[in-house]
């Protein structure tokens, strides 16, 4: 039963009045009645106090209930955070150790590349050292590239090709820059081998190394040309500086504004290729290559080719796997290219060399 504020005040007044009456009369009955009234008033005040505190007690009990439910979750969360931090620390430690191991391996492999000219690097050792890292998420690409660079310096063309194919290198347009750079490097290796082979009493292994290097160049040419043919919208302004393309197929490729500075193009199929625009060609060599079958050739490249790279222009060294057209057909092809380039070409200006007596198969 709820006791209002007015009821409580009335009880206190009644209690005071009964106590005063009992004290005035001095009778035991009156004192007993006053005591009972005081007792009932105290009980009512206690009940009132308990009633007013009940909501607070209920909220406190509710809080204790929720706290009891949250403690296990907080414990689990704390444990999870602790495990995560420990796992992150362990991963960081492992990665640091892995990086240290990789740098040591890289140093050992680079020592193979820096051997003196008289020593040939060991591809088996390189593969043993690098193979575990080629599938690593952090250094896999770096290890793969390093392995390819090392294999390009040793007389092991089969290993070179197998490594390329097994690791799917050169299958995406994003690999063009890497393949081009590698082709330059391998071409430089071949030129260095030529210099060393020209020396008297050179090691016989250098001859095998040159043969393997030529195979590597042909393989890289095949991969590069395939990417150019497969990506016709990305080939303008192609970079072939100081590259040796051997037995390649660039037929139908748009090579507008390409840069062939210092390049050697031997037995490359240019049928229906577009060599228009500002093609750079300083120190270029179109050896055994059918540029006359191109769809278009800009100036000043076309006059240069007509004057210097005509069929059999060097009948001691230049040979053709596919015979060039005869003189009248060649002159007609040149005339069409001149018309497209708006270039006045006289028939007397069209040169044509004498075919060599014997075909040579090795690149010169």
Image (cartoon, rainbow, N blue to C red):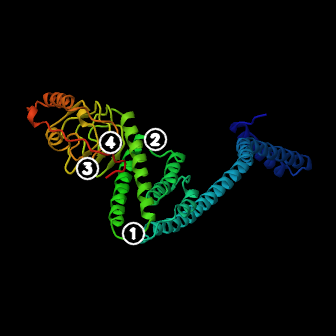
Question: Which one is closest to the eye, mark 4 or mark 1?
Answer: 1
Marks 3 and 2, how far apart in space? 37 Å
Q: Please name whichever residue, 138 or 186, is drawn nearer the observer in this view of the structure.
A: 186
Residue at the limit of the structure toward the front, as seen here: 357
Q: Please name whichever residue, 163 or 103, is drawn nearer the observer in this view of the structure.
A: 163
In which quadrant of the rendered view does residue 294 lie?
top left
Q: Which mark sits nearer the N-terminus, 3 or 4?
A: 4
Q: Which mark sits nearer the N-terminus, 2 or 1?
A: 2
Specify few, some or many for label 3: CA neighbours under 10 Å numbering under 14, 14-19, or 20 or more. some
In the structure shown, which secondary structural element does the residue marked by tag 1 occupy? loop
Write down the residue under mark 4. 267
Write down the residue under mark 2. 171
Marks 4 and 1, how far apart in space? 29 Å
The answer to whether residue 313 is left or right of residue 143 is left
The answer to whether residue 18 is left or right of residue 100 is right
Q: Please name whichever residue, 60 or 355, is drawn nearer the observer in this view of the structure.
A: 355
Marks 2 and 1, how far apart in space? 38 Å
Question: Which one is closest to the eye, mark 3 or mark 4?
Answer: 3
Q: Which mark sits nearer the N-terminus, 1 or 3?
A: 1
């Amino acid at each position: 039963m709820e006791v209002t504020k007015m009821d409580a005040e009335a009880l206190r007044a009644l209690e005071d009045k009964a106590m005063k009456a009992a004290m005035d009369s001095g009778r035991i009955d009156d004192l007993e009645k006053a005591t009972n009234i005081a007792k009932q008033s105290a009980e009512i005040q206690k009940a009132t106090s308990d009633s007013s505190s009940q909501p607070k007690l209920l909220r406190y009990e509710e809080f204790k209930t929720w706290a009891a439910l949250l403690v296990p979750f907080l414990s689990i969360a704390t444990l999870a955070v602790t495990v995560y931090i420990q796992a992150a620390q362990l991963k960081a430690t492992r990665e640091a150790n892995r990086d240290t191991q990789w740098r040591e391996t890289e140093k050992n492999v680079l020592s193979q590349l820096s051997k003196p000219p008289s020593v040939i690097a060991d591809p088996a050792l390189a593969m043993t050292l690098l193979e575990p890292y080629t599938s690593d998420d952090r250094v896999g690409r770096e290890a793969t590239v390093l392995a390819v660079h090392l294999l390009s310096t040793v007389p092991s063309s089969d290993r070179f090709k197998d490594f390329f194919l097994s690791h799917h290198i050169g299958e995406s347009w994003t690999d063009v820059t890497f393949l081009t750079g590698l082709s330059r490097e391998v071409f430089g290796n071949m030129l260095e081998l030529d210099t060393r082979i020209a020396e008297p009493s050179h090691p016989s292994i250098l001859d095998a190394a040159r043969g393997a290097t030529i195979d590597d160049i042909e393989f890289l040419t095949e991969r590069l040309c395939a990417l150019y043919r497969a990506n016709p919208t990305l080939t303008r302004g192609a970079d072939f500086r100081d590259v040796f393309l051997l037995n390649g197929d660039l037929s139908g490729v748009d090579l507008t504004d390409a840069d062939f500075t210092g390049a050697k193009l031997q037995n490359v199929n240019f049928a229906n290729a577009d060599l228009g625009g500002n093609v750079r060609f300083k120190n270029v060599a179109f050896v055994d290559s059918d540029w006359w079958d191109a769809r278009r050739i800009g100036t000043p490249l076309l006059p240069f080719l007509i004057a210097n790279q005509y069929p059999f222009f060097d009948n001691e060294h230049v040979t053709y796997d596919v015979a060039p057209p005869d003189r009248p057909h060649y002159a007609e092809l040149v005339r069409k290219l001149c018309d497209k380039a708006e270039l006045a070409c006289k028939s007397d200006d069209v040169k044509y060399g004498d075919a060599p007596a014997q075909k040579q198969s090795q690149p010169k």
